């Protein structure tokens, strides 16, 4: 929300600079996203009065003017603006003035000649001094503008605009009044409310329609007041226009501007109906199913039946708390209006605007909760402004309300000792009472507790911790000393984060970069990665966008769009990894959340280089996966099997098992899947973190190495080509027993000397005993046992040479 510092200081004016004021608000929980002046920096521009205007002798569209700026002699300025006239007051950039421009240096005004006529300065339009330019010509200043005055001072262009981030729980701060209330409490200063007459003189022929509220729970308070004979020739006062523009709102016409002004000033949305378009009485009711209404933005919507509408005998006039209807809209010819001021329950407005693709200032406030005691004050303020400026005549105020349906403000008991326990310092009870009372709470002291009743505008106060937060932020977080808390040391150390960080570092060392993405994904992408092994997909009830509409079942659905994004920006070699949760289940009740780590890789093995490069393959990815495993792990505990997942290449993918427990997958995306995603050959992997961390923890145990030497024996066997290496290694390890400390394949041969359908495999076997030196006979017996097991189980033949 943008708000003018000058406007704020009309309500409360502490002896602080703009920077200090912004810091106070931020520390009180109202973060200042940005702070800037009304206009960019410029200098040398003053108020001038045009003394004479003559036609340029050599240019039809130029005028030669004499301009009084309060100096001894008037300035001669050549001007091409069509609206210049004698007696006009406008900004004058004198020689040497620096006007704002797109570069930092600015635009400097110099003496010049235009078509042979000397020009000593420039008459300025609004855009030249960084204001909104509504007309093609000079900025016309009021007749009473003092000649020679610096234009920044006269127009208040050094006034600061605060762009404040209002959190959803602080709907009471969506106004000048709400922010000023915070400033007044922080600085212990009184707040200056504008004078609002309690009773206006009422016209004799009252045109205010009667009101009936049938949806009393959704609208427990509704007020109307008519104003007739409004003089529409009167424009919005400049002070009001400035306040609106500086708050980020456009000035329309006076009636619209008044409602917007009060919205920003008090935080109460108002709506004006053209009184001459209302047929019969006003009814506040729920919409009828399939009822239609054309809104002010010319959008025709069909209502479902749970929306709150303002209607007359002819049908719906407005979508309550969101936007008015076109049929009863105020136009430039409207002279009789009916003003609406109401309290709508937040639950009656919430989500209705988004349903129709709308987001209005009114709905933003009503969804968060508008002060239910504010409608009457805001209506009086609006009627006073309209009647005093335009001479309109106010009608009788009509009110329909049900006080029992208004929000309740239950007292909250706050033990004084609880404040010390939570904040950590002693705060005098009198200080607590002052803070809470200035914030609008009704406070009564009872023994060692404070009984606090929240004000009508604080929808976010319900428990004692809410009160403690209010005390702490107004007391000042900077005033609370930093004290090291007393910690009870626990030896139950959870190393999950540390071990996961070690895995991340291993991947970074292999050229991967960490990605951090949403836990939501695109339903279309999930369909491409669909497989029974991934389980059910959970759709979101209210997604933030169409491409983030379901919970991800695999981290790959988050990483693959990252790859697409980088490939589209000429990054041919991509390596990403991510740790996070995957979500499987069709409802919240049976949702399974699995901590996982996923990798994705596209492109060559190495970055571009002078030496020969090659495309990434299955074994490169397998190598990267094995960097996550402990270096001393028993290879028998890791097993790979051919994958049958539909979205993976059937000949270039595998399932990963640890101790016969399925932990993940690796391989190449199926060409059809990659084609649909417009991806080249893409390699992916995903593993569950829990079994991986368990394996790593076990390897962190300290094991005394054997002091006895190792013995190596190599064997070469002929075996059927269809038998997998994984199966053969498992057989060898099972037959060898504990003396086999390591095993690897170092040669594969298929050729003329090997029978068709077979291949020759050569294995290195490393034998070692932790208690004694192995004899040749013991090693030979163990090796023979391995060869026999291979022959019995796989018909393997030992090769002699």
Image (cartoon, rainbow, N blue to C red):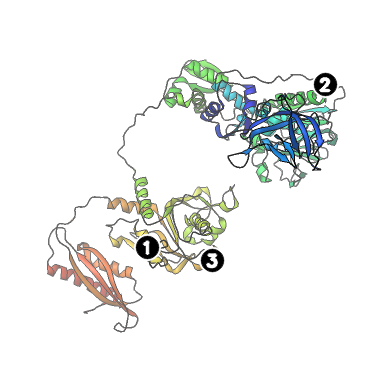
Measuring from the top left, give residue 766's x and y in whole percent.
Answer: 21, 65
Chain-order first, disc 2 or disc 1 = 2
Q: Is residue 217 visible?
A: no
Q: Quadrant of residue 763?
A: bottom left
Q: Residues within 10 Å of mark 1 (few under 14, many from 20)?
A: some
Name the disc covering residue 537, or none: none
Position of residue 178 relative to residue 570, above or below, is above
Q: Residue at x 35, y 55 (%)?
A: 628
Q: Is residue 760 visible?
A: yes
Name the residue at the front extreme.
Answer: 116
Q: Residue at x 48, y 17 (%)?
A: 429
Q: Which residue position is annotated with label 2?
A: 202
Measuring from the top left, give residue 657's x and y in whole percent.
Answer: 36, 60
Measuring from the top left, give residue 623's x and y in whole percent.
Answer: 35, 62
Gap between marks 3 and 1 measured at Cα: 23 Å
Position of residue 100 relative to residue 682, above or below, is above
Q: Residues within 10 Å of mark 2 (few under 14, many from 20)?
A: some
Q: Which residue position is annotated with label 1?
A: 622
Position of residue 142 relative to residue 563, above or below, is above
Q: Quadrant of residue 256?
A: top right
Please, what secondary structure does the residue beneath circle 3 have? helix
Q: Residue at x 29, y 66 (%)?
A: 730
Gap between marks 3 and 2 measured at Cα: 75 Å
Name the disc covering residue 675, or none: 3
Q: Which quadrant is home to the C terminus?
A: bottom left
């Amino acid at each position: 929300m943008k708000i003018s510092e000058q406007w704020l200081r009309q309500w409360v004016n502490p002896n602080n600079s703009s920077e200090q004021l912004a810091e106070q608000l931020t520390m009180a929980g109202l973060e200042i996203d940005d702070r800037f002046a009304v206009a960019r920096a410029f200098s040398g521009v003053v108020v001038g009065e045009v003394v004479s205007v003559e036609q340029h002798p050599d240019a039809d569209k130029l005028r030669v003017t004499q301009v009084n700026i309060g100096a001894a002699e008037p300035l001669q300025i050549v001007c091409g603006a069509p609206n210049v006239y004698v007696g006009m007051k406008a900004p004058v950039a004198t020689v040497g003035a620096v006007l704002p421009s797109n570069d930092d240096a600015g635009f400097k005004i110099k003496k010049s000649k235009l078509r042979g006529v000397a020009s000593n300065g420039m008459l300025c339009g609004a855009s030249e001094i960084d204001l909104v330019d509504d007309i093609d010509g000079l900025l016309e200043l009021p007749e009473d503008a003092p000649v020679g005055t610096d234009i920044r001072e006269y127009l208040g262009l050094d006034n600061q605009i605060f762009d404040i981030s209002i959190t959803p729980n602080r709907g009471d701060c969506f106004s000048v009044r709400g922010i000023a209330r915070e400033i007044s409490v922080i600085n212990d200063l009184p707040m200056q409310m504008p004078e609002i007459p309690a009773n206006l003189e009422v016209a004799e022929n009252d045109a205010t329609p009667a009101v009936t509220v049938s949806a009393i729970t959704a609208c427990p308070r509704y007020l109307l007041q008519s104003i007739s004979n409004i003089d529409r020739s009167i424009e919005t006062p400049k002070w009001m226009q400035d306040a609106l523009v500086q708050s980020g709102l456009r000035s329309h016409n006076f009636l619209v501007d008044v409602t917007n002004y009060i919205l920003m000033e008090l935080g109460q949305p108002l709506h004006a109906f053209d009184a001459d378009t209302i047929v019969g009485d006003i009814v506040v009711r729920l919409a009828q199913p399939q009822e239609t209404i054309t809104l002010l933005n010319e959008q025709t919507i069909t209502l479902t039946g749970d929306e709150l509408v303002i209607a007359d005998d002819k049908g719906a006039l407005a979508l309550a708390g969101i936007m008015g209807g076109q049929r009863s809209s105020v136009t430039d010819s409207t002279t009789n209006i009916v003003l609406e001021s109401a309290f709508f329950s937040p639950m009656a407005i919430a989500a209705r605007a988004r349903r129709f693709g709308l987001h209005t200032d009114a709905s933003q406030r009503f969804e968060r909760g508008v002060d239910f005691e504010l409608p009457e004050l805001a209506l009086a303020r609006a009627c006073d402004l309209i009647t005093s400026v335009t001479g309109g005549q106010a009608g009788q105020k009509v009110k329909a309300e049900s006080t029992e349906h208004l929000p309740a403000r239950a007292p909250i008991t706050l033990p004084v000792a609880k404040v010390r326990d939570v904040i950590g310092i002693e705060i005098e009870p009198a200080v607590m009472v002052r803070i809470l009372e200035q914030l609008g709470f009704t406070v009564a002291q009872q023994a060692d507790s404070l009984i606090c009743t929240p004000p009508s505008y604080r929808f976010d106060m319900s428990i004692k911790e809410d009160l403690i937060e209010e005390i702490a932020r107004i007391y000042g977080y900077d005033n609370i000393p930093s004290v090291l808390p007393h910690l009870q040391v626990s030896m139950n150390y959870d190393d999950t984060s540390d071990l996961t960080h070690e895995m991340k570092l291993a991947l970074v060392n292999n050229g991967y970069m960490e990605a951090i993405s949403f836990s939501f994904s695109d339903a279309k992408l999930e369909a491409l990665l669909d497989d029974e092994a991934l389980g059910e997909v959970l759709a979101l009830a209210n997604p933030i966008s169409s491409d983030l509409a379901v919970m991800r079942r695999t981290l790959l659905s988050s990483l693959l769009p990252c790859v697409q994004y980088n490939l589209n920006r000429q990054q041919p070699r991509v390596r990403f990894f991510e740790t996070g949760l995957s979500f499987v289940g069709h409802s919240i009740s049976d949702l399974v959340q699995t901590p996982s780590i996923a990798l994705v890789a596209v492109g060559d093995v190495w970055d571009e280089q002078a030496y020969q490069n090659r495309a990434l393959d299955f074994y490169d990815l397998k190598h990267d996966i094995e960097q996550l495993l402990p270096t001393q792990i028993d290879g028998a505990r890791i097993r790979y099997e051919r994958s049958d997942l539909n979205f993976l290449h059937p000949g270039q993918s595998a399932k990963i098992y640890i101790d016969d427990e399925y932990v993940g997958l690796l391989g190449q995306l199926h060409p059809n899947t990659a084609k649909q995603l417009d991806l080249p050959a893409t390699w992916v992997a995903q593993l569950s973190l829990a079994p991986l961390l368990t394996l790593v923890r076990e390897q962190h145990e300290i094991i005394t190495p054997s002091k006895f030497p190792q013995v190596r024996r190599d064997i070469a066997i002929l075996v059927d080509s269809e038998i997998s290496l994984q199966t053969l290694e498992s057989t060898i390890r099972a037959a060898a027993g504990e003396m086999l400390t390591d095993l690897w394949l170092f040669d594969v041969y298929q050729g003329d000397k090997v029978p068709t359908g077979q291949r020759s495999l050569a294995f290195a076997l490393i034998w070692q005993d932790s208690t004694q030196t192995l004899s040749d006979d013991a090693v030979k017996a163990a090796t023979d046992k391995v060869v026999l097991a291979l022959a019995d189980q796989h018909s393997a033949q030992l090769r002699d040479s």
